[in-house]
Image (cartoon, coloured by chain):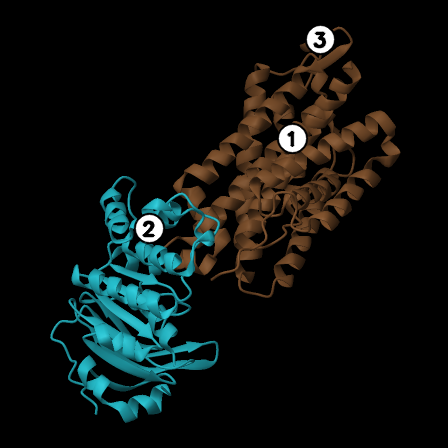
Chain colours: A cyan, B brown
Amino acid sequence: MNAADGQLAKPLLSLDKVTTYYAQMRILEGISLQVGAGELVCLLGGNASGKSTTLKTILGLVRPRAGRVLFAGEDVTAWPVPQRIANGVAIVPENRRLFGTMTVRENLELGAVLRDAGTYDADFERVYTLFPRLHERRDQLAGTLSGGEQQMVAMGRALMSRPRLLLMDEPSMGLSPALVQQNFRIIKEVHESGVAVLMVEQNATMALSIADRGYVLSTGEIVLSGSAAELLRSEDLKRAYLGR
Amino acid sequence: MHFFIQELVNGLTQGSLYALIALGYSMVYGVLKLLNFAHGDLYMVGAFIGYFVIQWFGGPMALSVPVPLVLLVMFVLAGGGVGMLGVAIERFAYRPLRDAPRIAPLITALGVAFLLENTMLLLFGASYRDYNTSAFISFSTGIHIGPLNVDIVRIMVIVLSIVLMFALTVIVNRTKLGRQMRAVASDREAAEMLGINVDYTIAATFFLGSALAGIAGVMAGLVFNQIYTLMGFVAGLKAFTAAVVGGIGSIPGAMLGGMLIGIAESFVTGYISSTYTNLIVFGILIAVMLARPTGLLGRVPLQKV
């Protein structure tokens, strides 16, 4: 069950045998994965599997000790975070990580921090159209919003930089099942508007229901990969690795 | 009544100085969660810069250029110079410890304080230097209504302080840099994840906070005349008190705390006796902390959902 033929001709994102350490601990061991420009790919795994570190490596918050990160045809392994964001990567962090003492609008504005003032009014429109609730609450302090609304702000904030690739770190965490459904509908919608998505998730069923392909990460190694349909069918292996 | 107003003016003057220094404490605490104990000494360095500008232009009795120009140069050099000094201190003393346990930069800050004080002591000696303000600014200028005398220097200090505090508030609340400063103060890693240049933002914060302290130092020299290398210690302590009373990390809090402490000091000295001043000021600190541990305008940290 190892359809490693997710090998795309010209992927938008490619991790090539990436090994990342945190202090002396090896978190990622030679992982390779790809995301195509039109794809929604999920990265599944339990706790401490290295999922967040993978995203941080792609974004540039951590540098790999070995291997390369390739984005839009360029080797970005040594690029600093702002350069990668300017080039089209954005993240919706785990637990939202909003600036609670700032308003919704200010949080969104900070998503566009690398862009020049006055160039992103259209992006505000887009976010408010996707999330009408945020328009109502635009002058409210982000910390006073409900969990679901905060997730919207986090997503909107990431969209403000007009990313080509959206990284999502456990978007279902802390949300009720109904909100998770709603959230994933929106993720699908955003994806269909032309943004590639790499989603890290523990909730495999939910993630695979909207993904094109998936990888399974276990203690720092990719142990499984394939199309979403294949992974959904593979009950035993999924249970073994994800404990669900 | 005029005595009341006199003491109020004194209180506002002193309060402005404390507020300007307290702002630097709060701003740096906001972005780095560090209590920069060297901050009071930046105020002292500013005072000395102002002193030397006066000497450079010929000394208080024989200024070679018009007084407004001297004042302008004093403020600009003290603000800019101390601002840069603050940036350098952050770069070399605090940045390497950014991810170290919080006690490490705290101890370093104490070390920087001693370094500044003793360097100045070595360079300029322990004797007091005198601005001798009345030699070049006539204290008969000002507001004189009956027995009420408010001299021009105090008026200038209060007005300039208000302008600076207003400017800072505009910068922090309405500009992109200000948003980035507040973002870094709120969640540094999340700020990084958006591409914010955290190093630059922290450096800018240090520059602004230190510049304000430097300018406050010049104001102190103009109002109180005598400056000395250890003047930053007590002022820094009181300004730190003001910042905490107002709510550490809060900019309006620092302004409020500074004014409160300044006015309290002034009224206690005026109406009771200077013997009780420090007792009552620090008593206020304890009382506020007991009643409201996060400070008057401080915020209980919001729980991240």
> How far is disc 2 from disc 3 in space, using C-alphas?
59 Å
Q: How many marks?
A: 3
State the mark number for residue A135: none
* Circle 1 residue: B16
The quarter holding residue B47 reads: top right
Q: Are marks 2 and 3 in contact (CB under 8 Å)?
A: no
Residue at the image position 65 percent from the left and 30 percent from the top: B16
In screen coordinates, is A177 left or right of B275?
Answer: left
* Circle 2 residue: A133
Could you confirm whether marks 1 and 3 are on the same chain?
Answer: yes
Q: Quadrant of the N terminus of chain B?
A: top right
- Indicate the position of residue B278 as horizontal and vertical percent values: 81, 39
The reply to whether residue A155 is in sight is yes
- Indicate the position of residue B82 as horizontal and vertical percent values: 57, 39
The quarter holding residue B266 reads: top right
- Indicate the position of residue B248 as horizontal and vertical percent values: 62, 47
- What amino acid type is highlighted by mark number 1? Ser
* Circle 3 residue: B144
Residue at the image position 33 percent from the left and 77 percent from the top: A203
Q: Secondary structure at mark 1?
A: helix
The reply to whether residue B51 is in sight is no
Q: Are marks 2 and 1 in contact (CB under 8 Å)?
A: no
**What crowding class fits label 1: few (fewer than 14 Cα within 10 Å), some (14-19), or many (20 or more)?**
many
Q: Secondary structure at mark 2?
A: helix
> Which mark is nearer the camera, 2 or 1?
2
